[in-house]
Amino acid sequence: MIEEPPVLTLIEGFPRPTQAQIDALKGIPTGFVCDAMNGLGSLATQIAPIGPDIDCVAVGPALVADNGAADILATLAAIEVAQAGDIVVASVAGHQGCSASGDQVMGMLKNRGAAGFVTDGPMRDYEGIVEVGLPAWCTGLNPNSPYGSGPGTVGGTAVVGGVSVSSGDLIVADRNGVVVIPHARIDAVIARVAEVKALEDGLEAKVRNEGFCTPVDIQKMLAEGRAVKA
């Protein structure tokens, strides 16, 4: 007879970004971060701010709660595991048939000091979530109830919105979406973000001062044979 496996696994000891690394990316638009990662890093478009009534901006370490479809046991366990400043990333295997969280879970996470919540499923209790005020990103709203029976894992890795997210990765999220910076690449991305910001600031000044400009030099492309007139 096969022994019943545990319904909850807690993974400890994953590396976390430093406070200096977190602070370095506060106030940086997600577009700049994606540019610094060669145009990648964002979760799927469907994972968006829950609504216009919450200032959905957050930067912090990912704490991954890997649930099965229609289940939230790992998310509930993440409430106890979460440290101040964490962003709980709750996978429900992309299941859209019921909510992945609601206002009570958001309230408990906020009381715990979490900086935000991200899920690849819908949420419910919009008015209550607005009252709590914790930044949240999800695929929409659905009032159906989830289960809490497991199995689930907290502190590991899950694929969310087409991106592999590991606990300890750095999440940068705003009104445009959610970006994941792998822990090993945080310093390199911070350095590259400074270059991206300088380029963007220069282009913005040029657009404002000249009224019209284009980053494509057509005459140069024609001269180099990279463009032709037909």
Image (cartoon, rainbow, N blue to C red):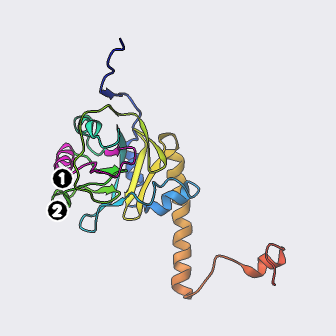
For residue 103, above or below residue 201: above
- Numbered badge on residue 103: 1
Please provide the residue range marked out in magenta. Answer: 87-112
Q: Percent from the top left, x then y, of residue 168?
A: 40, 39
Q: Earlier in the sequence, mark 2 or mark 1?
A: 1
Contact between labelled residues 1 and 2, with CB atoms less than 8 Å apart: yes
Q: Percent from the top left, x then y, of residue 163?
A: 48, 47
Residue 184 vs residue 87, the one in the foreground:
87
For residue 225, above or below residue 143: below
Which image quadrant for residue 45?
bottom left
Identity of the residue drawn at 47% across and 55% down = 42
Can residue 65 be seen from the camera position used here? no
Q: Which residue is mark 2?
A: 127
Identity of the residue drawn at 51% across and 84% down = 208
Q: Percent from the top left, x then y, of residue 49?
A: 33, 61
Other residues around mark 2 within 10 Å, as few (<14) / some (14–19) / many (≥20): few
Horizontal arrangement in the rendering, residue 26 relative to residue 228 (left or right): left
- Numbered badge on residue 2: none
